[in-house]
Image: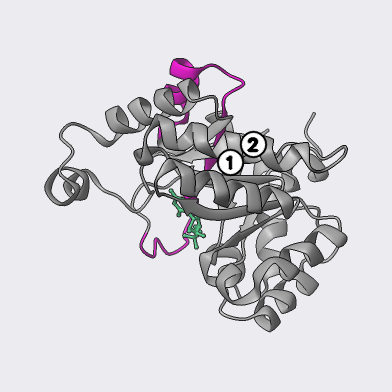
Amino acid sequence: MLTTKDVAGRIMVALDFASVDAAEKLIAELKGIPCYMKVGMQLFYTAGPSFVAKLKEQGYHVFLDLKMHDIPNTVKGGAESITCLGVDMFNVHAAGGRAMMEGALEGVDKALTGINGAKSPIVIGVTQLTSTSAEVLNQEIGIAGSVEDCVIRYAELTKAAGLHGVVASPLEVTAIKAACGESFISVTPGIRPAGAAMGDQSRVMTPAEAFAQGTDYVVIGRPITAAPSPREAIESIIDSVLVKA
Ligand code: C5P
């Protein structure tokens, strides 16, 4: 039997804000809801490590979504620095290849040897962005085949590199779990409650549908952050999941 706390802990709120003030306003509105906080590049590049430290002091789980993609040695260094921030999860692009992803894990290990009792962050590979359609994949990026085939190939590569899971669309969760096993974590953006605007996302599902597919975490930004009442928006999302559970 799922509780409100179980569901909230699996909702990652995307703090896509231009300033610390705007992010803190939202955090204050959601006070008491034990959701996961996702800090992406817009906020991190302006707010920096001290903002992440503040979230950790407030007891939140933090996903640092910087989607690293560089040569293995540089990603190793980035992962070492990120691990020292004490985040619970971070990610790299699977398209960077196996050695790059292994570099991320080496960076984690290097950081952890210097911190007594520190917990290893969950390291996730980004497969294809949820804004990528088949047309973009084939005609712009130049990868032939379906989005799902590409996502599964990247998920298998991510698993082979030793990472803990992937970011993908909820539409691909069943196939990812079948290919990589139930314990391989799936983090799914591209979530739109019934009737919400698509924005720039193209492969979407409702929160309840995504959990029914077996996703471990849903990432939700604008349907919460741009709602007239973010608190009501997340509460109604939690209710919609509990009703279907
Ligand atoms: O506002 P919205 O719900 O579309 O936000 C989705 C969030 O998930 C954004 O922060 C975006 O950067 C992130 N994301 C994504 N697709 C991925 C990986 C992360 O949309 N493949």
Question: Is residue 196 magenta-colored?
Answer: yes
| Residue drawn at x 35%, y 40% as measured from the top left | 95
What range of the chain is rendered magenta? 172-200
> Does the magenta-highlighted stretch encompass residue 148?
no
What residue type is disc 2 on? Lys
Place residue 16 in its image quadrant: bottom right
Can you identify the residue that label 2 sits on? 244
Q: Residue at x 69, y 43 (%)?
A: 10
Q: In this rendering, is residue 174 above or below 125? A: above
Colour pattern of the rendering = one colour
- Nearest the eye: 156 or 194: 156
Q: Nearer the viewer, residue 144 or 91?
A: 91
Which label is found at residue 234? none
Q: Which mark is residue 208?
A: 1
Q: Amino acid at mark 1?
A: Ala
Residue 88 rendering spot, x and y as whole percentages: 71, 45
Say which quarter of the image contains residue 104.
top right
Residue at image location 51% in from the left, 36% down from the top: 103
